[in-house]
Image (cartoon, rainbow, N blue to C red):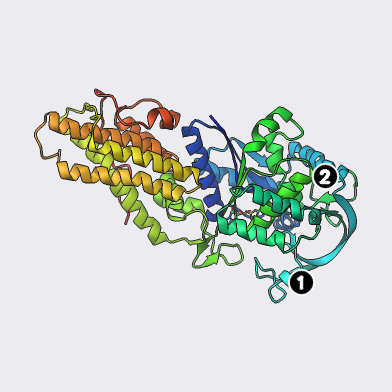
Amino acid sequence: MGHFFVTTPIFYVNDVPHIGHAYTTVTADALARWHRLAGDEVFFLTGTDEYGLKIQRAAEDNGRTPQEHADITSARFRETWDLLQITNDDYIRTTEERHRLTVQKLLQRVYDNGFIYSDTYEGPYCVPCEAYYTEAELNDGLCPIHDRPVEEMKEANYFFKLSEFEQPLIDWYEANPEAVGPDVRRNEALGIITQGLRDISITRSSLDWGVPVPWDDDHVFYVWYDALINYATAAGFGSDDDRFAEWWPHVHHLLAKDILRFHCVYWPAMLMAAGLEPPKALSVHGYLQVGGAKMSKTTANQIFPAELVDEFGVDGFRYHFLRDNSFGPDGDFSHEGMLERFNADLANNFGNLVSRVTTVVDKKCDGIGPAPRPDSPLASVAAEVVRDSAAAWEAISPSRALEHTWRLLRETNAFLEANVPWKADPGPEVDAVLGDALEVVRLACILASPAIPNATQAAWERIGLSGQVTDQRIADDAVWGLYPAGLTVAKGDPLFPRLK
Ligand code: MSP
């Protein structure tokens, strides 16, 4: 049994969650659910990033104090994750006391280790990014990410000696070829490092909405350098050393490419400077776009999860983003694609299989489920599907994992069409075919539960099984032949009525 510590970025509270935030969070949730099935001990962390100029200004625009604004928006994120049935184990807010303590402890260590010094900074700053740029990095004077004008900033700052970590970072990347993925992102991060790293400003004296710098009252930490530390706070750094020692070696960050530089360059360097291990893994995905553009408040092209949940249900929402937006490249959101996917995979394949099997068992077997055959022609397909789905989840590829799982559903629907048990007279032949199909439903419920937790639990109960699908374990339970004969099978309304 292993440990799996998975994190999402902590989201800024200037704005409410949209489907881009949900994409990362649903992916992390599905991975967490998969690892629980795999028997791992899981710690799944998400939360909100509440300090900095951007939040202070958003609060001012809304006539609130920054804390009031953060409280309101952080609650919106939490509600959205509840709606999407996200199973996070902790929800960190950077304005919590536990976080202040960890940030101060960790950065004091970096300071004591001699990697922080004081100097004056002057340069272009993008508030939406909360990041300084060099003139060369701007596009015609505009922020390369937001395409908006930057502000000139000048202030006395403390600097982190990032330049000293160029070689250690390169060595770390070489020694850990799997740590940052997929490969395009690893190369992008390595490219940033090999082009040369300059020291970075990590404090602010012009603002007080931040974590106070322990060695200088006039400064707060720059929002990114407290934010990254959230992962260490939640793992227990500075508050519970045993817990930190247990979980930190397993941390796996998920994020989109917009914040690759912070996570894949600055963060491992800061950890090294504090004498800690860099993250075990960083998985970086692309943007979920709408009409070819990144979603943002300014372009007013945001789509909110609740709108889609109203139409497709929680399972329909989760399934679409996991199946249709493979982890890595950018992908365009398409309502039409979502509808097609819902009808093809959920209504036709999953829903139809469950409804066929339960209806025919009701009719031909008096509603009592027969046993599967040990030598069923579906047994070897099932074994391959379990193996391939597991490998794909391990490789952070929910889309391929679900594709493999759906192969089993498709082949079983075809098997039923070839055997037409609904036309045959009751007897051992029909029992054999239906027993096999019931066993597939049982297995598919386990394998698909990270994506569609509600429908899989409902189907589980319809075929007469008790308990929770989520309590199953891949090694023990995702094995052909465990569906017991004699359970009461119930017909019911379609799990996924077709949508127009
Ligand atoms: N607060 C920082 C992160 C600090 S982590 C120590 C931040 N917040 S954010 O609210 O802007 O969230 C960025 C993250 O949200 C992305 O990295 C990604 O996980 C998710 N996404 C937001 N919009 C997205 C898309 N349009 N597409 C895909 N993911 C998106 O950055």
**Quarter of image, ligand 1:** bottom right
Task: Give the answer, above or below, for where 311 lies relative to 151.
Answer: above
When asked about the image quadrant of residue 197, the answer is bottom right
Point out the tag, 1 or 2, that comes first from the N-terminus.
Answer: 2
- Quarter of the image with the C terminus in it: bottom left
What residue is drawn where x is 24% and y is 22%? 486
Q: Can residue 492 be seen in this view?
A: no
What residue is drawn where x is 72% and y is 44%? 229
Residue 174 place in picture, x, y as percent: 65, 51
Tell me, yes or no, whether the two marked residues, 1 and 2, touch with CB atoms within 8 Å. Answer: no
Q: Which mark is residue 135?
A: 1
Q: How crowded is mark 2: few (under 14 residues within 10 Å), some or many (20 or more)?
A: many
What residue is drawn where x is 34% and y is 46%? 406
Kind of residue sitting beneath label 2: Val
Residue 113 place in picture, x, y as percent: 86, 43
What residue is drawn where x is 11% and y is 29%? 427
When asked about the image quadrant of residue 379, the answer is top left
Give the alpha-carbon distance from disc 1 to disc 2, as whole Å. 29 Å
- Residue most extreme to the left: 425
Q: Mark 2 points at which residue?
A: 110
Kind of residue sitting beneath label 1: Glu
- The one nearer the camera, 243 or 309, is 243
